[in-house]
Image (tube, grey):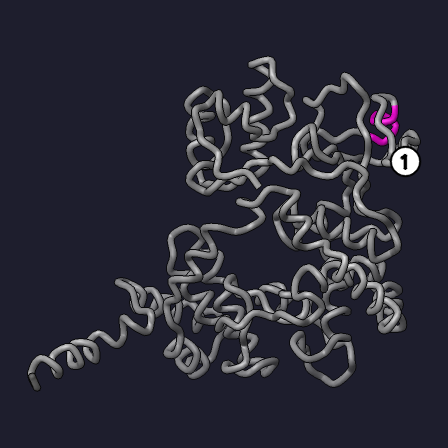
Amino acid sequence: MMIKILLPLTLSAALAPLALGATPGFEACIDEIREKAVDQGVDPGTADHVLNQVEHLERVIDFDRRQPEFTTPFGDYLERRVTPQRVAQGRVLLHAHRALLDRVHAETGVPPAYLLALWGMESNYGRHFGGISVPSALATLACDPRRGDYFTGELIAALHIIEEGAIPLGRMKGSWAGAMGHVQFMPSVFLQYAVDGDGDGRRDLWNSVPDAMMSAGNFLAGLGWDGAYRWGREVLLPLGFDYGQAGRTERRSLGEWRRAGVTDSSGQPVANLDIQAALLLPAGHRGPAFLVYDNFDVIMGWNRSEFFALAVGHLADRIAGGGGLHTPPPADAPRMSRKQVIQLQTALNAMGYDSGEVDGILGPATRNAIRAYQQANDMIPDGFPDPNLLARLDIAASENL
């Protein structure tokens, strides 16, 4: 009995490094990153201190493969993020931090409602920073082949932040992708855009709301925010509208959209101005339509998801006193898994409709390919993978919401 008991314990101890998250090649990958970090100015002692403690986190890979921006229908995504509670809290904070937000607005050109919307979207106004070790999350993704180069750069940036003294290693917690603090900056964004907003000599995005808000405004300004305009607006489309005009690459002036019969959500023609705008249909022709301006692209510089940018814009409008959407998203939109999106991309590519890289992400290239297929097959070309399109391509959708 003694041998039977001791043998598993001995084996368990021998395999302890694997239980802590080691994978074949992970240690060799970390050694390569260590060399790159030192070459890029990180002190060898800092590199050793941090990288000797990172672990491979399999759950981070799981999160990466099922990001909600790419696997959740727009209606569900919006409902979970632009909630009555988040709108109400944003309005409370608009009053509570009015002096600070006005100062950020004056210095960066970014209105308070957008700063609050991003704060609410990213950390629920500081309630949820994420509890994952940022260096371990970044190390896991840096050693994964999908986006290894990008996350290697982010990990090295995190080493610079620790070396700067902005946050100690043990408290550098964040999201599964390595985003940190009130406004969930990636490390490279922190290094370039984080600022000391409260005058204490430190850039602290975890404990200082002034630092976080001023840094958010500084980031948006650096991305090209134009304080003279809003992000976009919900619009209504006339009967017989040519849905082939939709998509972020199909930009027209507001005057052109007006002549095409597009109105605002109250039914008034959109302004007859030479402001470029693109038409987005995130839930297809049965859902809401939006005209989006240059500032929408700025928000997408923060997060490369149209759903995220639309949610930020709509939440900002609600915080500023606006109401809900005129046209709600359809309740029967299919939820597609990454595997099903890959099947869709593969089928479209095989038929000559270029959906870009087969990556399981329902992005602009895939939507353009869907639109081209729909146009060629006498379907409404809204670029949306509705049940009819999936049935034609013999792709079974997941259970409807």
Q: Residue at x 68, y 22 (%)?
A: 244
Q: Residue at x 71, y 50 (%)?
A: 311
Q: Position of residue 4 (x, y in %)?
A: 9, 79
Residue where numbered disc 1 is placed: 266
- Decide which of 388, 42 is in the foreground and name it: 388
130 lies left or right of 9: right
Secondary structure predominantly adopted by residues drawn in magenta = helix
| Classed neighbour count for the residue bearing mark 1: other residues with Cα under 10 Å, few (<14), some (14–19), many (≥20) | few
**In which image quadrant can residue 204 be found?**
bottom right
- Decide which of 353, 387 is in the foreground and name it: 387
- Decide which of 354, 307 is in the foreground and name it: 307
Q: Is 235 situated above or below 77?
A: above
Amino acid carrying label 1: it is Ser
Q: Residue at x 84, y 68 (%)?
A: 92
Task: Identify the magenta region.
Answer: 253-258
Q: Residue at x 49, y 62 (%)?
A: 153
Task: Let me know if residue 150 appears in the view.
Answer: yes
